[in-house]
Amino acid sequence: MRIASTVSDSIVDGPGLRFTVFTQGCPHHCPGCHNPATHDPSGGREVAVAELAAQLSTNPLTEGLTLSGGEPFLQAAECAVLARYARERGLNVWTYTGYTYEQLLSGAVKDADALLAQTDVLVDGPFLLAEKSYAALFRGSSNQQLIDVAKSRAAGKAVLWSRSDPLSHFTVPES
């Protein structure tokens, strides 16, 4: 898997203490992106998913895994493996993407369903500089949505996650 970096104790990439993986490569190139060094798909470094899983397991206080970028859906299959590992250990998984939920469901993004199946909350949509907001919870711009993936799949449409929703309803799906 090609990554830019990791943060072992993030408190801004979802609720609680999180292990965040910044994937390398992004086709969106959003003006004002806070992480433009992740755009080049040949940048960063290669790392085995098993190595990331081992790092994820080092802190017993970690509550979740966040996949950010870059664009995690460019490496959806590898990210899905790491996300499944996290969920099997009782952690919740948040995935940030510049794609919309509807784009990911359309089949246009290879292996998107594999990663969606392992994602509890999807933060979707491109960063829009004109809608930049420090008040947007866990988002850079107000157009981005916090989508509860399990509830959305059950409803057949995007269902927004709210901070009042308990994270305990996130479960590991059957294989």
Image (tube, grey):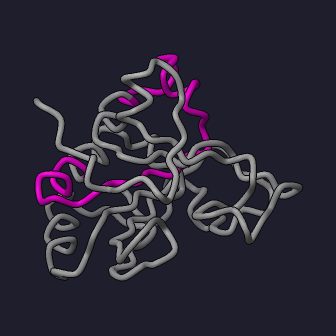
Residue 21: x and y in percent read: 38, 65
Residue 103: x and y in percent read: 58, 25
Residue 83: x and y in percent read: 26, 51
- Asked if 125 appears above or below 9 in the picture, the reply is above
Q: Residue at x 19, y 52 (%)?
A: 87
| Viewer-nearest residue: 49 or 19 | 19
- Asked if 23 appears above or below 148 in the picture, the reply is below
Q: Residue at x 21, y 71 (%)?
A: 56
Is 70 covered by the magenta stretch?
no
- The residue sitting at the right extreme is 130
Res. 38 image quadrant: bottom right
| Viewer-nearest residue: 138 or 83 | 138
- The residue sitting at the front extreme is 164
Quarter of the rendering occupied by the N terminus: bottom left
- Asked if 3 appears above or below 144 in the picture, the reply is below
Residue 170: x and y in percent read: 27, 47
Tell me which segment is drawn in magenta.
83-112
| Viewer-nearest residue: 147 or 116 | 147
